[in-house]
Each structure stands twice: as C-alpha cells, then as structure tokens.
Image (tube, rainbow, N blue to C red):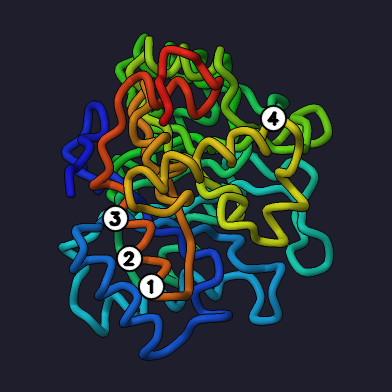
Amino acid sequence: MRTVTLPNTRLHVSALCLGTGELGAWLTGRDSERLLEEFLKLGGNFVDTAHCYAFWLPAGAGCSERELGRVVRTLGVRDQLVIATKGGHPSGGAAYPRPDRYMEPELVTRDLMESLERLEMETVDLYYLHRDDPRVPIDEIIDALNGHIRAGWVRAIGASNWSTARIEQANRYASEHGLRGFVISQVQWSLAIPNWQVTADPTTRYVTEEDADWYARHAIPICAYTATALGYFAGSAKGEQSFHNPVNAQRRERAIHLAQQLGVTATQVALAWLLHQKPVTIPIFGTTNLEHLRECMRSAEIALTPEQVQWLAHGDRSYASS
C-alpha cells in the first residue's frame, strides 16, 4: 500500500487509516489483536483513536485508548504504527462531562496526559484537537501544543472539525513565530453528502468543494472520517438515516454501476473516490469484522480515471458509461 508523508514531518502513514472508536467495547481480547494484525498484514500502519472514545457505549470513555495500547503491547508492534489520538472535545452529557471552555490549554493538556496514560505510551505520533472553540485565542492553542512537542509527548499536531479559516490562522501564527503548525485535518468527507448541516453543530464539519480547493492549495492532507457514509453504499440502516437524499441516491446508483463494471463493491468505489481526490485524502474506516476490513483495504488497489471521479459525484457526461 502506498504511503503519505505528512508535511514537515517524518511520519509516513498508510493511504487508509483504521478507526478504533469501538475498540474495547464491541471488540476486545484476541479479536482486537486479529484486527490489528490483519491491518498491518495488508499494508496499514495509521491508527486513529481519541480521548472521548467510546463514551456513547456501555464500556465508557477511554476504552478505545486502553484496548489499543494493550493490543500494541501484546503484539509488540509500536514501531510499525503511526498512532493518532485526539483531545479537546465538548461535553457528551453525563457519560462524558466537560467544562464549557473545553479547549482551554490546561484541559487539553490534561486530556493528553490521560491519553498517554491509557495508551501506556510516552509519545503519540499525531495529536489532533478534536473540535475548535473560537473563544480560545489561536496563539494560546499553538503555543501550548508546541510545548507538548518540545516535551516529547507529541510528534506532530492536527486539527479535527476546524474551519479552514482557523487552520490558516493557526498555521500563519506558527510560521511567523518559528513554531509547528497543523500538518493534517480530520474532517467528515465521503462520496455521500450528509443530511446534517454544519450550522446545527458548529463544532463538527464536512468538506465542501470550496474547502477541498483550499486544502489542495495549501497542501494539507485530509483524514476523512465517516468515509463509507455509515455503510450507505452497502444499504445499511444507519447510512440510510444519515445520508439518504436525492443527490446521494444518484451517487450510490453510479457507484453501484461502476462497481459492477470493475468487479468490486460500491463501498470500495466510494473509498477509491476519496483516494483519488485533490487534496491528498486518507479515508478512515472503522470495523469489527475482518472481511469488511479486507474489503476496505482493497479499495486502495482500485484505479479510477479523472472522468470516473467526476462522474461519480456529478454524473458528468464526459464519462461514457456502458
């Protein structure tokens, strides 16, 4: 599998990222180990977790980091992985209570220390800020994160669910002061456009065409979460609820049609569509099933033409479908 070098770092990450939101909850013990073993076997090395995972499940917050750390130690594969975690998340209610100003540097520092303790690691390769809070000045945020880099707790930093304007502001400040800026942005993106609106929750975002142009111009990779649209292209109930609309229905039809031509699945086509985007895009997928893992990983082998990429999203007539 090809790798992506994160800008201004020595981190080389696989073209697909394994999300571990349900690790330690629905998947534990030897089953967790088999999943990571297979991911590595198929060429993956980029693994994503977060301080808040999985507060929405009975196992509670922190289970993903604890289980991931255990699996990595059991398998002895720390040096084969690029591990990312995230901190700075708003309140999730009683299951994940947080102060109103959840992005204050002191709280993010505490998140990081707890994440390292759960993972039982001295350093995390990539540390994302899970959300943004414009009330916190950008200089305080970048100064604090660079302190973590100097301390050796973090190798590189990323933004998650941040606007392109705030990322640009942060990286400009970092450049002007000889500091490290954000090297990647984790944000929702898939071939299917979500039904939810950014304005409904300003702390979550998905990639618009304007955003994609901005990331391409600034050479900042996107790590795309919900890359399979919750299984929408496979007809899952969750996907239908969150992504079904007239535009997406047409996109799914085209994905199914092209998948039949290529001898692959519509989910693989949707992931391949992301892998062929400009800017560089690394899809994140989560699974507890080895066959689904293999299906997603094989999407990296699919070559699409520029016309096919355009046609999947817009039905452009320049692609001659048979």
Residue contact between numbered discs 3 and 2, judged by CB atoms under 8 Å: yes
Residue contact between numbered discs 1 and 2, judged by CB atoms under 8 Å: yes
User: How far apart, in angstroms, are the residues tagged by discs 3 and 2?
Assistant: 6 Å
Per the image, label 4 sits on a secondary structure element best described as: helix
Q: Nearer the viewer, residue 42 or 102?
A: 42
- Tag shown at residue 247: 4
Task: Give left or right: position of 61 versus 11.
Answer: right
Q: Of all residues shown, which one is farthest toward the bottom?
A: 30
The image quarter in which residue 295 lies: bottom left
Q: Amino acid at mark 4?
A: Val
**Image point 70% across, 80% down: which residue?**
58
Q: Amino acid at mark 1?
A: Glu
Q: Residues within 10 Å of mark 3 (few under 14, many from 20)?
A: some
Q: Residues within 10 Å of mark 2 (few under 14, many from 20)?
A: some
Q: Amino acid at mark 2?
A: Arg
Q: Of all residues shown, which one is farthest toward the front?
A: 322
Per the image, label 1 sits on a secondary structure element best described as: helix
Which residue is denoted by mark 3 in the rendering? Answer: 298
Residue contact between numbered discs 2 and 4, judged by CB atoms under 8 Å: no
Residue contact between numbered discs 4 and 1, judged by CB atoms under 8 Å: no
Q: Is residue 189 visible?
A: no
Task: Give left or right: position of 264 versus 226.
Answer: left
Tag in front: 4 or 1: 4
User: How far apart, in angstroms, are the residues tagged by discs 3 and 4?
Assistant: 26 Å
**Image point 47% across, 51% down: which residue?**
267
Compared with residue 109, is residue 60 higher up or lower down, i.e. above or below? below
Which residue is denoted by mark 2 in the rendering? Answer: 294
Between discs 1 and 3, the one toward the N terminus? 1
Q: Amino acid at mark 3?
A: Arg
Q: What is the x, y in percent for residue 133?
A: 69, 32
Q: Residues within 10 Å of mark 4 (few under 14, many from 20)?
A: few
Which residue is denoted by mark 1 in the rendering? Answer: 291
